Image (tube, rainbow, N blue to C red):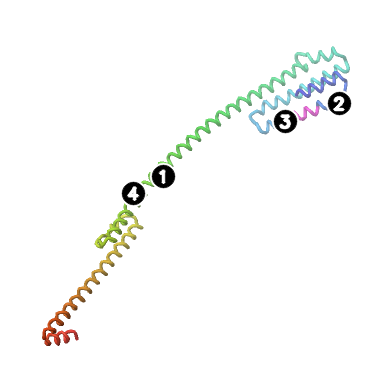
Amino acid sequence: MVQIQQYLTDVSVTGDRSGFEAATENLQQVEQRVNAMAAHYPAAAAFTKQILHDARVMHESGVRMTHAYLEQGQAAGNALMKDPTSGFDIATERLTGQLESIIGRLQRERDTGKDALHDAADRMRLVVIGSSLACAVLVAVLLLLLYRMVVPPMRTLSGAMAHCAHGDLVTRVDTHGLKEFHSLASLFNTMAQRVTDLIDHERKVAEDIQGKVQQILDVVARAAKGDLTVKMMAHRATM
């Protein structure tokens, strides 16, 4: 906007009419930028439309004023510039007021948006903190439940294995609890029972052998004393 005013003022002072073309090009650039702003900010459509109108009015008023300066003299140009209804100054003031108005509105909405963004960020932080605390409590509860389900059975099984290692073969493990520990406890109990059965079997075999050896010793002792009948009976018994 300032460049349009500057180009037309330069034409009035220097008489170089190329400034008209430069002012027109600058007006077109202003129109492109305002239209782009309207496309990105539809809520300001009314303001942008008024700005375009006022910019064109200012340009037309400035062109008329500049022609008056060049063709009719300073007095005619000053009269058009100071005209209270359609003069260049009043058109410039009107356009400046529109620009200041929309800039103020955009700034207020920007500030409102920033406040809303800060509030949303604060709420998001609270949600994240609350979610983190809830997750921490949930993990703690799950770990506690897992501890109660896993550690006591493992301690029981470990204790039973220690008793078994020290010769307490009658020790057994309760098979109630988790499925995995039920299977493990059943395997331990089966193993302990098999060991017990094997030891019992070996004890019986040893006792039987010891009885037979004692019988043989008795026969030998009596035979040594001359009791050959006993020896023959023992021999026959062994056969």
Image coordinates of residue 224 in percent, x first then y, are: 13, 84
Q: Secondary structure at mark 2?
A: helix
User: Which mark is drawn over residue 85?
Assistant: none
Report crowding for label 1: few under 14, some 14 to 19, many 20 or more residues within 10 A (C-alpha): few
Q: Of callouts 4 and 2, which one flags the residue occurring earlier in the amino acid sequence?
A: 2
Residue that carries the numbered disc 1 in the rendered image: 139
What residue is at 27 percent from the left and 60 percent from the top?
166
Task: Please name which of the two marks, 1 or 3, marks the residue nearer to the observer.
Answer: 1
Do callouts 4 and 3 mark residues in contact (Cβ within 8 Å)?
Answer: no
Q: Amino acid at mark 2?
A: Ser
- 145 above or below 120? below
Residue at the spot of label 3: 33
Q: Which residue is mark 2?
A: 18
Q: Amino acid at mark 4?
A: Arg
Question: Residue 29: horizontal and vertical position, in percent?
Answer: 76, 30
| Magenta span of residues | 24-31
Q: Main secondary structure of the magenta part?
A: helix
Labels 4, 3: front one: 4
Q: Nearer the viewer, residue 194 or 73?
A: 194
Q: Nearer the viewer, mark 1 or mark 2?
A: 1
The residue wearing badge 4 is 148
